[in-house]
Image (cartoon, rainbow, N blue to C red):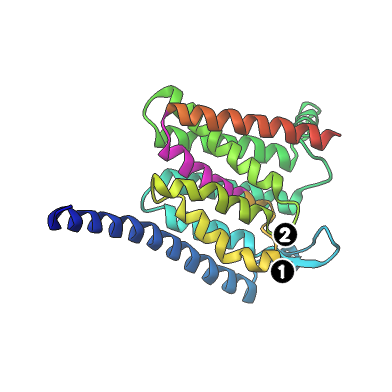
Amino acid sequence: MGSFGATRLGTFVGSFGATRLGTFVGSFGATRLAYGQLRRRPPGNPDSWRRTNHAGRPVLLQAGPAAALGSAAAVLPAAPAAALAVAAAAVCGRHDDLRGDHRRGFRAHLTALRGGEVTSGTVKLFGIGAASLVAGALLKEKPVDKALAGVVIAGTAHLVNLVDVRPGRAGLLVLGLGAPGLLRGTLAAAPMGAAAALLADDLGEVSMLGDMGAHALGAAVGSAVAASNGRLGLAAHAASLVAAAVWGERASSA
């Protein structure tokens, strides 16, 4: 390879890494900053930011809004539609953190809705679903792609929340789902940076993402997947996510 070709290749590789690294570092830093501030001065009732985890240990919920803020801030310049999906998922997730009950699965919440009760799960189902469809419509051009993108964003948000039953699982899933997307664009670096910023405290059972953080990170990863895939990739991801949702529904009803 000549010196000119080597120079162009080096420039491309450098800009490729710098863009993604910058997004990752920016998201990581914003998330840590928000997390520290929220821990020092939790908004509202301090008790609303405390939970007991699966092992009976007290944990903090400030990781949730920190993840949402960090990932939304990092995706906003490149993809406002993704930031919209993250924000909506965070708001609906926070509502569930505050108002959620023992009911699990779409069937339980839709049954309650038929009886005239709007549960926090119903708010998540329709709120995140609608925001995801809007985001998908803004990210893609053709009607079929818009719909598939919406399914991918909502389905990924649901999947990340579905696995968030033990310390670190949701964060590790976000890192795993986002890594392949780094080859296609910069958006995946945003949720990865936010997840990495909170992973140590999550694994150490100091804090937990809660529905707010899990849904927000999932929506961010889903947006990255939707933005970087064509119709075939969107269809494959959508089918996999629907299958995961069906499995989760059966598991919750068992």
Q: Residue at x 35, y 58 (%)?
A: 17
On screen, 197 above or below 138? below
Is residue 213 shown to the viewer in this render? no
Q: Is residue 165 left or right of residue 254?
A: left
Please tell me which residue is depicted at 19% across the width and 56% down the height of the picture: 6
CA separation in Å, label 2 and label 1: 8 Å
Based on the picture, tell me whether residue 229 belongs to the magenta stretch.
yes
The part of the image, by quadrant, that contains residue 157 is: top right
Q: Residue at x 38, y 25 (%)?
A: 142
Against 105, residue 13 (above or below) is below
Q: Which mark is residue 167?
A: 2
User: Decide: marks 2, 1 in contact (CB < 8 A)?
Assistant: yes
Q: Position of residue 94 (x, y in %)?
A: 66, 53
Give the residue number, with chain letter if any, for mark 1: 204
Residue type pointed to by label 1: Gly
Q: Is residue 60 left or right of residue 27?
A: right
> Residue 158: horizontal and vertical position, in percent?
64, 41
Seen from the viewer's position, the closer of residues 183 and 55 is 183
- Amino acid type of disc 2? Pro
Q: Is residue 3 magenta?
A: no
Q: Residues within 10 Å of mark 1 (few under 14, many from 20)?
A: few
**Among the 4 quarters of the image, the one containing residue 115:** top right
